Image (tube, helix red, strand yellow):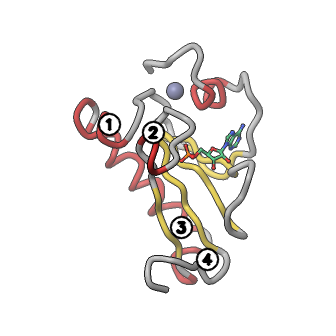
Amino acid sequence: MEQEKSCLFCKIVNGEVPSEKVFETSKVYAFKDIYPQAVEHYLFIHKEHTKNINSMAAQKPEHLEDIFKAIKEFTQQTYLETSGFRVVTNVNKNAGQTVFHTHFHVLGGEQLKGFGV
Ligand code: AMP
Ligand code: ZN
């Protein structure tokens, strides 16, 4: 798996930085967000480094399938599919991307605000 030495989420995949795992496959890792924005807030990442969703779609489109299948499995194994969840990914400055390893926020566990809700 290609990784970036200085990337925080590559370090989480390697176990160099601790995290609270909630789901894992051979390709995908998911863990609790350290500053949760909802009662349940998880980050789904591919074990191989890309920097954002557009890079992933251009360079490793198969990673999108890996990630969304993992989200499907996880939300079906938990009550999140039934109660509802949201998937968010930020790209660059205006979206507030702070970690440049593609990640998908999975939010739920309560009524989520915004986006017309
Ligand atoms: P973004 O702003 O979309 O780049 O999201 C980065 C997310 O990573 C934020 O929601 C942070 O709270 C989260 N985060 C940063 N460092 C850690 C960490 N060590 N463990 C878990 N989540 C983290
Ligand atoms: Zn990385």
Q: Which residue is drawn at 77% across and 33% down?
A: 18
Quick check: 44 left or right of 40?
Answer: left
The circle on residue 56 is: 1
* Tag 1: amino acid: Met
- Residue in the picture at 66% in, 47% down: 31
Q: How crowded is mark 2: few (under 14 residues within 10 Å), some or many (20 or more)?
A: many
- Where residue 104 appears, as percent x and y from the top left, is 49, 51
Amino acid beneath label 2: Thr
Q: In which quarter of the image is residue 107?
A: bottom right
For disc 4, the marked residue is 79
Furthest-left residue in this view: 58
Residue receiving disc 2: 102
The quadrant of the rendered image in which ligand 1 is seen is top right
Of callouts 2 and 3, the N-terminal one: 3
Q: Do the residues labelled 1 and 2 touch (CB within 8 Å)?
A: yes
Residue type pointed to by label 4: Tyr
Q: Which residue is drawn at 67% across and 52% down?
A: 22
The residue tagged with tag 1: helix, strand or loop?
Answer: helix
- Report, in whole angstroms, how far the alpha carbon at label 3 lies from the one at label 1: 22 Å
Q: Are circles 3 and 1 on residues that touch, CB within 8 Å?
A: no
> Tag 4, which secondary structure?
loop
The residue that label 3 is drawn on is 75
Cα gap from disc 1 to disc 2, whole angstroms: 7 Å
Label 4 or label 1, whichever comes before in sequence order: 1
* Label 4: how many Cα within 10 Å (few below 14, some 14–19, many 20+): few
